[in-house]
Image (spheres, rainbow, N blue to C red):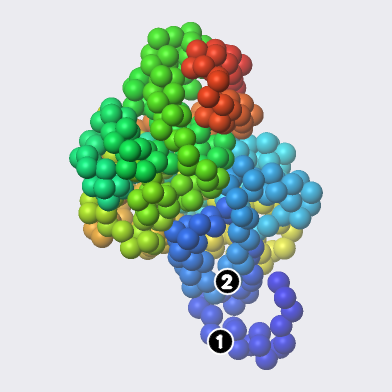
Amino acid sequence: MKLRSLAGALAATVALPLGAANATDLEVTHWWTSGGEAAAVAELAKAFDATGNKWVDGAIAGSGGTARPIMISRITGGDPMGATQFNHGRQAQELVEAGLMRDLTDLATRENWKEIVKPASLLESCTIEGKIYCAPVNIHSWQWLWLSNAAFEKAGVPVPKNWDEFVAAAPALEKAGIIPLALGGQPWQAAGAFDVLIVAIAGKDVFEQVFAKKDEEVAAGPEIAKVFKAADDARKMSKGSNVQDWNQATNLVITGKAAGQIMGDWAQGEFQLAGQKAGTDYTCLPGLGVNEVISTGGDAFYFPLLEDEEKSKAQEALASTLLKPETQVAFNLKKGSLPVRGDVDLATANDCMKKGLEILAKGNVIQGTDQLLSPDSQKQKEDLFSEFFANPSMTPEDAQKRFAEIIAAAD
């Protein structure tokens, strides 16, 4: 915390709410840097600043794959931030096991997180050896196809209702000079799109056999062969995207240069920022319009152990604030994600968010692959699909063989 003059400190003490007299700055690292994401982060910062503390933004440009090694290096190198974003799952497990992360169990118990955080798998992903180490902030689902209504109108074909209709519309879209499928060049985008195709084409049970049970035989079998055929269609449809970041691909859809994108519900933040309306300017198909199942991955904040007592107090204030009903509503409406609390009012949610809420309420959910696979196994999968989508000479059969080998060795 920066030193302040005595007069400044006294003034701050008078101005701050009761219990925040020792307010402090807290650096928070994350990889939310697109326009929609920045708008959502601003809601978290505003809520935390209202406690009398100060959110010091530590945004790291690029994807999680770029940001996580930097975050981990700082923590292990003795230069920890006050709080850091990770995805729900096992990304921080080694840091916890090394004794570098703060135990939030007492706070979680006092505030009944086990009662309010739904589904339970979110908090389970934060729990190691019975202790809770993170604060879930949202539910992000990957299983969405986002469509530009204007692009289909220009091509003279109806807006598709499912994946098969989308593939069938590709020739008309290309004839109209429109890229059928926008896909960025970051490896996680290709791998995520394939995971979405598994649920849509092969179904929930096959997805869980492959990623939860690590069943090599299923991964090498006929149901996954159908998925690789669909991935090959996606590869052909995405030719010409020529963008790197996911939000650049989303912008191709927003501007009608591309007809669709397989991307998580965080894409909604970009549509919203562009002033587009769900159901009017764009269409969303959960489960690609085939299997309406969504994953319950997303984001959580972890808190490195700090020696500074005041910063430790600020960490607890932030963890508590992240799960407040008003914070959950303000943040998730901007982010396009679903709240981790089932007791908040989302009456102002758009049509696509309401679809997600309905699917969640029905229990048609799966865990995300970040929760089911180790970071190393995830990286191998990303490398495979990055190569598959970039290299037309790799056959679906060869790619499936490598995929089965990854699943057989996965942990």
Look at 41% across and 33% down and name the residue there: 237
Look at 64% across and 48% down and name the residue there: 67
Label 1 sits on what residue type?
A: Val
Q: For residue 170, what is the image quadrant?
A: top left
Residue furthest bottom in the image: 7
Look at 53% across and 55% down and name the residue there: 32
Horizontal side of residue 400 vs 376, given as left or right: left
Horizontal side of residue 252 vs 376, given as left or right: left
Label 2 sits on what residue type?
A: Asn
Residue furthest right in the image: 77
The residue that mark 2 highlights is: 53
Give the percent coordinates (x, y) of residue 241. Answer: 48, 42
Q: Secondary structure at mark 2?
A: loop
Seen in the picture, residue 378 relative to 98 is either above or below; the reply is above
Q: For residue 264, what is the image quadrant?
A: top left
Q: Is residue 410 visible?
A: yes
Look at 54% across and 14% down and name the residue there: 398
Of the numbered discs 2 and 1, the one sitting upstream in the chain is 1
Q: Secondary structure at mark 1?
A: helix
The residue that mark 1 highlights is: 14
In the image shown, does 370 or 232 lie closer to the viewer?
232
Give the percent coordinates (x, y) of residue 84. Answer: 61, 53
In the image shown, does 250 or 341 lie closer to the viewer?
250
